[in-house]
Structure formats: structure tokens, C-alpha cells
Amino acid sequence: MNDAARNRAIDAPVVVEVGLGDRGYDILIGPGLLDRAGEEIAQRLPGTRAAIVTDENVATAHLATLQAGLDRGGVASTIITLPPGEKTKSFAHLQDVVDGILAARLERRDSVVALGGGVVGDLAGFAAGIVRRGMNFVQMPTSLLAQVDSSVGGKTGINSPRGKNLVGVFHQPKLVLADTDVLDTLPLREFRAGYAEVAKYGLIDRPDFFVWLEKNWRDVFAGGAARIEAIAQSCRAKADVVARDEFELGDRALLNLGHTFGHALEGAVQYDGARLVHGEGVAIGMALAHRFSARMNLASPDDAARVEAHLQAVGLPWRMADIPGELPGAEALLDFITQDKKVSRGTLTFILTHGVGQAFVAKDVPASEVLAFLKESHPA
Amino acid sequence: MNDAARNRAIDAPVVVEVGLGDRGYDILIGPGLLDRAGEEIAQRLPGTRAAIVTDENVATAHLATLQAGLDRGGVASTIITLPPGEKTKSFAHLQDVVDGILAARLERRDSVVALGGGVVGDLAGFAAGIVRRGMNFVQMPTSLLAQVDSSVGGKTGINSPRGKNLVGVFHQPKLVLADTDVLDTLPLREFRAGYAEVAKYGLIDRPDFFVWLEKNWRDVFAGGAARIEAIAQSCRAKADVVARDEFELGDRALLNLGHTFGHALEGAVQYDGARLVHGEGVAIGMALAHRFSARMNLASPDDAARVEAHLQAVGLPWRMADIPGELPGAEALLDFITQDKKVSRGTLTFILTHGVGQAFVAKDVPASEVLAFLKESHPA
């Protein structure tokens, strides 16, 4: 094997197939995919043009590489750059992106390419879903969180003044290119926050994966083959859940493990990312969900302790006391929970667990039990 | 049979099933459906709440009846009223409707009810398609055009400054209630314009239906059983095409018979409804499509003459000379055609015909032939 052939073999991405029938698609995971984006897109999609949607920070780091990669594959691209941050997920920016795509005279079979994290992916995917009633969409997630979560499953959307992600569509990508090289440029705190969602897949229904993470998390953080494996396992796990319940009528709610408590905490700090980013909220939320399940005699306290220990080992926050600054009281936190949009008709629905890898959808959880638990868990 | 039972039997709506698998739904066609809307919705849909989206004109005529009808069925309703007219199909009004639905705290299983013509249906359907990534949607079309065309098939959307209907989603309704009583309040010109789309279904692939219309059009205009039959046949015809090609990748383009010439003429009069409304443009467009097909030796001139004669008999315009005021020249009309979004990659795609009921998708139609034909057909 000569050097070029060996490099090609080493670089060959892991492929995860998302089985959604005629809406199915491949997720490619590995190094060098920005470079090869044009080739991969040209092989799979009919259009010869693309609109790249990105944000100012990602553009500085990666846009030139991607544009050159698209050029090499014969895909002409136009650029739509957005300000970074959650506030970009608005009607005004949606309209900007839609207009940018139409101004470039792209057709249905051309592609909208999202280069960025969850915000860019959610907004660009929504625009791709509504221009000409649905264009081809390619995700190029640049954060660990986006590679293992928001780029899989077809949820797109923007925020409303009345709540997050209240407006959007299900629009599956035609292709996801998760270039693992770009993760090397992430700040450690952001990588860790994304890791919380990786661990989540083990906790939902893959106990063996959680055992593997307990042993190999240092290698996942270091990069290389273990990181690619962790991302691929996460995408497979999410793809399996999504294939069972594409439109979130049932099982897909399992993906919200840790998110009900997590969203409440994000709301409680008024989405101040200096205090708590989404993945950190999910980490604390997962620890709380396990501890609450133990309190309800659904799971063993040993399982809760095991989850807490792993989150602590990787350096993630795992209890409310780990959030800097003061938190609202237990009653106020419960209010944040009951305003959560996953609350259906006044009953409290939680993702609880019978143990590591045994999460389930629990309906009609008594609010009084939740309140008592929040009081016990509260640092104040 | 007592009087009440007889009335019920007479009033029983015709049901057309739209066969789209798990996105399939029923179209109910008949008198008194505004009155019975609550009952019909409560029987079929889980939610107990609805947002009625309507326009000021339709609200004056029909809103009180519908609200009372919903109340009787136990469906609580909130009202979102829009200004009438095509300009309402904008991002700004979309955002208003979305916010109105969220303000009423409706959930995914509650319903958005569109009470109005195509504008209201397209906008409300789009909003229903994106709030919480898709809510239940009920169409209550109040114009003949909406009953036979825009309420069937799931196309929703708004206009962009760059073109009509460029932004939207496919979102199938869960139920269509076409109350034929409301058609009695339509101005004759508007009813006639809707009738052009009724005739279109005969011309596409139902020659027997066209023969029936040639014999029975006076009864269709008069109301009663013939009108209900014509609407039901039209909905069946469109539902068949949509079931074959839900996302307009092929055959569904047949529904554009008459629309390429028609849209060009609408553009040429700058969408001035005093000179030409959409259905009238379609009528002239259908006559031109048949005459052009004859000129290309695809169909017999007798078929073109037969179509022209029928449109003339019902009082529809059928040639460019029937449009009041001056028209731009043939070259300018061709420009309007080639800007049409159905033009793919510079080639001209037309719906042409081999005769009455034998329409087909013609690709690569030479622009020079179209131009020569437009010159011959031009009144100037």
C-alpha cells in the first residue's frame, strides 16, 4: 500500500445510514470532509449549485476550506453569513436566508449547506424546508453537539418570543458531513457540553456504550479513532430512535432525557451561557433524572451515583450547586418545568429510568413529588 | 321517512377520499357544513380547540355561522382575521398568524381552520405546517376555486418579492369541509373563474367529465346536485393526480394545464384583477395550450375549437383579445413565460395535449415556436 492509498484508507469516513425510507440519508463521519464536500455532494445530489449558510465565527475558521472543497467538486456556491448566537433563530433572519437563497436563483434540486452549530443548522434547515416547498439540504455540523444531536433527525426551526423552537418543520437532510477535524478548534468547555449528549445515548438505551465511554472517554476527548467511534455510535443511536418515530409522536421523546430539568435550569439562569450552556444543563438534568428515578424507587441509587461520577470525571457539572451564582427557589424551578412545551394538557411528562440504558417515557408524574425532589436537591 | 330524516339524507355530504396513506384525508362536499363543522371536527380530530383564520370579507359573511357550528361540536375557537387579497400572502402576515396560534396556546393536536379562499388557505396552511413543526389543519374553502383546487393537495405558501408561492411547505389537511351553500354568495365572475379549474380536470385526463360539463354546465352554475357533482369530480380528479405525485416530481405538473400561458398573462396585466383574475388567465391559457398543441400537430384543431367554444359558452374569456386594455407584445409575453418558476434550467416545459382529456408534460418545447404562436395569437 503506498502512502496516498494508506492515507485514503485511514481517511475513509465512517458511514451511518439513517433508515427513513425515501427520506433516508447517510451521515459521513471522519477527517477532511470539508475538503471533500464538493465531491461527496456531486456524487449524491443532482444540483450543481449550493448556498452555504454559516455564522461569522465559523466562516472565519472554516469557510475558505469548504468553498475550495466545493469548487473542486464542481459545485458553485453562494454564501449567506449570519451573526452567531441563539438570537439568530428568528423570523427576521429566516427571511434573510430565504431571500438569499432565492436571490441566488437556486432550484429545488440545488442544495442549502449548513456550516456551523445547532443554530445555523436549525435555521438553514428551516429555510431549505420552505424555499420552493423544500430544497435539498446538507448538514456540515462544526460542533460536537451538532454532530451527535441537531444534525440527525430532521428537526429544524426558529424561536418565537413565546418560546424556543416553537416554529419549524421536519426536513431531513440528504447528506450529513461531520468533519471531525473541525472539532480540534472547539474550546474544551464546548466540547464537554457536546459530550453530555454523547453520554445521553448510552443512558437512554445503550448500556454497553455507556460502559465503553466510562473506559474510553479520555480518548474521545483526545481525538482520533475513539472520537470518531463515539460520534458514530451516537448518530446510530439517535438514527434508530428517529427511524422508529420520525415525527415525535411517541418514543422520540426519549431523546429528551435530561432536557426537562435542563431546560428549566437554562431558563432559571435566563439562558446566560456564561453560567450554563445547553449541554451542561442536559448533564445536570440527566443526573437529576436518575436521582429522581431512584427517589421514586424506579431505579437503584447506585445507578444515579454512577451517572454522577462519570459526569464529574469528565469535568461536566452534575448538580445544581455546580451552576455559578444564585438559582431561583424550588417552586420557581417547577414553574419553569410546567411551562415547558413538552408538558401536555397540564400533566407532567418526564423521561425517567429503570437504570443505566433503561430510560422510559413517564406520564402523569405528580408535580408534588417533583417539587419535593427539587427542594432536596436545591443548594440553597 | 320523516322530514328531519329526509333533510338529513338530502344534506348528507359527498365524501371524496384523498389516498395519501397516513397523510390521507376526507373531503366533505355539500350544504350546511359550516353549521356542522364542530361535529365533523370533533368526530375526527383529537384536539378540542381551534384557531379560525379568515379574511375580513369572509368573516362578515360566514364567521358567525362557523363559530356557532364549532361551539355546538364542543370545539373552542379563537379568531385570526386578515386583510383580503393576494398581498396578505407575506412573511409579515405569516408571522402574525403564527403568533396568534401560539398566543392561544394551541397544541399540535388542536386545529388551524382556514375559512376563506386560496389566499387564506395557503397562508393558514403554511402557519399550521410550521407551528410546533406541524399542527392539525382543516380547510373550509369558501370560493369555487378553493373548493376544487387550492384546498386539495397540501400545497401551502406565501409570495416572495422574487415571485409567487416561492416559500411554503407541503402540509396536508386532516379534513376539508366544502360547504356548497357559501358559493351562493359569490359574484358570478368569481364563480366562472373557479369553473375554469373545473373544466381543466376534464381537459387533463377525464374526457367523459368534459362531455358531461358541456351538457350540464348550466346546472352547475345554477347550484344543487349538479354543482356538488362537479365539485366532487374535480376533487377526485385532483386527488388522483396528487396521490400519484404528492411532492410534484412528475405527473403533478399536469395540474398546471393552462397555467404557463395564464401566469404570463396575469403578469402582463400586473395582476390587475379588474382586467384578469387567476381563473380567467387559466381559461385563456387552456385555450392557448390546445391551440398551440394543434399548431404543433400534436392535437386536432377540432379539439382546440371545442375547448374555445365551451369556455365562450360559459362566459369565460378564451383568447388574449378578451382581456380589456392593451397587452405587451409577443416578445414581452415570452419573457413572462421564461421567468416562470416552472421553467427548469433554461428549457421550456409546457403542459400540452393530444386532445380533450389527453394532456401531457412536454419538455424542451422550442421557445421560437412559442414566440411565433404568441405573435399569431396576439390581438395587436
Image (cartoon, coloured by chain):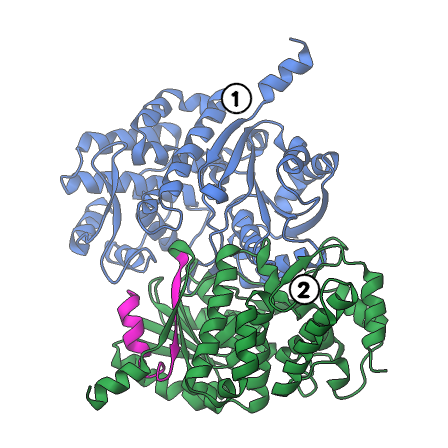
Chain colours: A blue, B green
Q: Nearer the viewer, residue A27 or B164?
A: B164
In this view, the mark in front (2 or 1): 2
Q: Are marks 2 and 1 in contact (CB under 8 Å)?
A: no
Residue drawn where x is 42% and y is 29% of the image: A233
Residue to which mark 2 is pinned: B353
Q: From this view, report whether residue A46 is shown above or below residue A331.
A: above
Is residue B161 visible in this depiction of the protein? no
Residue type beneath disc 2: Thr
Q: Residue furthest left?
A: A297
Where is mark 1, residue-wise? A224
Q: Which residues are magenta?
A: B23-47
Q: Amino acid at mark 1?
A: Gly
Task: Examine the rendering and report whether any part of residue A267 can be seen.
Answer: yes
Tell if the residue under mark 2 belongs to the same chain as the one under mark 1: no
Circle 2 — which element?
A: strand
Task: Indicate the chain on which mark 1 is placed.
Answer: A
With B376 as the anchor, is B210 left or right in this view?
left
| Residue drawn at x 69%, y 75% as measured from the top left | B287
Query: In front: A31, or B210?
Result: B210
Between residue B274 and residue B4, name the one nearer to us: B4
- Taking the view exactly as shown, the residue that stands out farthest to the top is A1
**Left or right: residue B58 compared with residue B276:** left
